């Protein structure tokens, strides 16, 4: 029997620094599609803040498109990719299933059934808003390729940095320090089971360093803490900002490797055997970690999202993942 269309509400960036919730008509799902009722979305603060401020470089408009983005940068645009919901209509094996999808902030949506990843029954759906950031963290770990026993420094205790530190800390024999300018992040590091250090107190001679602070000063810190022939992975995205680097002093003498990492492509070492679906399925298993709940630093109802997004961009201090809750 044919399914009727439905209405939905979605968050749109209408101009840099301004957003609103708009209504729209959803198409009826086809035989290979699902209609999902959103339970939660997460704000991926680093990238979404750049998008909200209109700081996506023109050269990256196509590369930075989210899978189900509507509109174009800088605005109007519907953006986001941390959506957890329940399948209302779709194939029998998915009906009623909690799923994750790389979909924007919207209360209902229709996508191909292949675009959703079932969330295991023992994983709280509210924790699964971290899936996209955890996928990034996993890809960064693959790009960094730490070895057992390595000294690892993660600079930047935002959500992605904390997730990288958590994954690195589970590698046998590795000594992991989470470095941040905010001393308040020491409590987060303790919950994650890793050492915390302010930049000026951080241990040097590190084997692997990951920069995830989004600040040029953080990248300078990473280079300074690196040991001989260390690997420094740049996991921050600076948007349109130009970043200066101290490539004098001992940069060449230390024979450092500076490597970029971006989640849009599976890390080189894994690419021959892994695709995005296998990577996301692995992320679902990694979500079986109650410690990750400590990375949800606040939540707000969907109706308040325009104000919340503006406030987080204006004053992000202390914020980790901010979860948006949708009415049933």
Image (cartoon, helix red, strand yellow):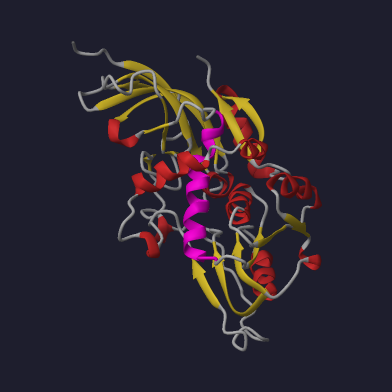
Q: For this view, does 259 lie left or right of residue 309?
A: left
**Residue reaching furthest top?**
1
Residue 74 appears in view: yes
Instruction: Considering the whole magenta stretch, tell me its main secondary structure.
Output: helix
Examine the structure image and report whether residue 132 is included in the region drawn in magenta: yes
At 62% across and 66% down in the image, what residue appears? 149
Q: Is residue 243 above or below residue 249?
A: above
Could you say where residue 179 lies in the image, as x and y percent from the top left?
A: 72, 59
**Residue closest to the eye, 156 or 77:** 156
| The magenta stretch spans residue 184 | no
Q: Residue at image x 62%, y 89%?
A: 253
- Quadrant in the picture for the N terminus: top left
Give the percent coordinates (x, y) of residue 62.
Answer: 36, 53
Specify whether 231 is left or right of 34: right
Image quadrant where residue 109 sits: top left
Position of residue 221 measured from the top left corner of the image (x, y, whole percent): 69, 69
Task: Judge by depth and name the residue closer to the eye, 43 or 175.
Answer: 175
Q: Which residues are magenta?
A: 126-146
**Number of numbered callouts drawn:** 0
């Amino acid at each position: 029997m044919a399914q009727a269309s439905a209405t939905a509400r979605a968050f749109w960036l209408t101009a840099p620094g301004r957003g609103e919730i708009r209504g729209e008509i959803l198409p009826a799902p086809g035989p290979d599609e699902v209609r999902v009722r959103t339970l939660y979305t997460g704000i991926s603060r680093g990238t979404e803040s750049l998008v909200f401020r209109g700081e996506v470089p023109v050269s990256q408009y196509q590369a930075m498109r989210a899978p189900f983005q509507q509109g174009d940068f800088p605005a109007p645009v519907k953006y986001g990719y941390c959506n957890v919901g329940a399948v209302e209509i779709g194939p029998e094996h998915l009906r009623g299933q909690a799923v994750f999808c790389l979909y924007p902030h919207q209360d209902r949506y229709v996508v191909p059934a292949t675009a959703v990843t079932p969330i295991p029954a023992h994983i709280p759906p509210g924790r699964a808003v971290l899936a996209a950031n955890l996928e990034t963290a996993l890809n960064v770990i693959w790009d960094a390729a730490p070895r057992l026993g390595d000294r690892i420094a993660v600079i930047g205790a935002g959500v992605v940095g904390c997730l990288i530190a958590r994954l690195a800390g589970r590698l046998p024999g590795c000594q992991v320090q989470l470095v941040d300018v905010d001393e308040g992040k020491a409590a987060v590091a303790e919950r994650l089971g890793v050492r915390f250090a302010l930049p000026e107190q951080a241990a040097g001679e590190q084997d692997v360093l990951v920069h995830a602070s989004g600040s040029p000063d953080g990248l300078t810190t990473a280079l300074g803490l690196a040991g001989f022939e260390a690997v420094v992975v740049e996991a921050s995205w600076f948007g349109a900002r130009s970043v200066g680097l101290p490539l004098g002093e001992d940069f060449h003498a230390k024979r450092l490797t500076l490597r970029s990492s971006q989640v849009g492509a599976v890390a080189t070492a894994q690419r021959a055997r892994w695709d995005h679906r296998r990577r996301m399925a692995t992320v679902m298993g990694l979500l079986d970690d109650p410690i990750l709940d400590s990375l949800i630093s606040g939540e707000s109802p969907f109706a308040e999202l325009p104000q919340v997004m503006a406030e987080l961009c204006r004053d992000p201090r202390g914020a980790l993942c901010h979860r948006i809750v949708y009415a049933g």
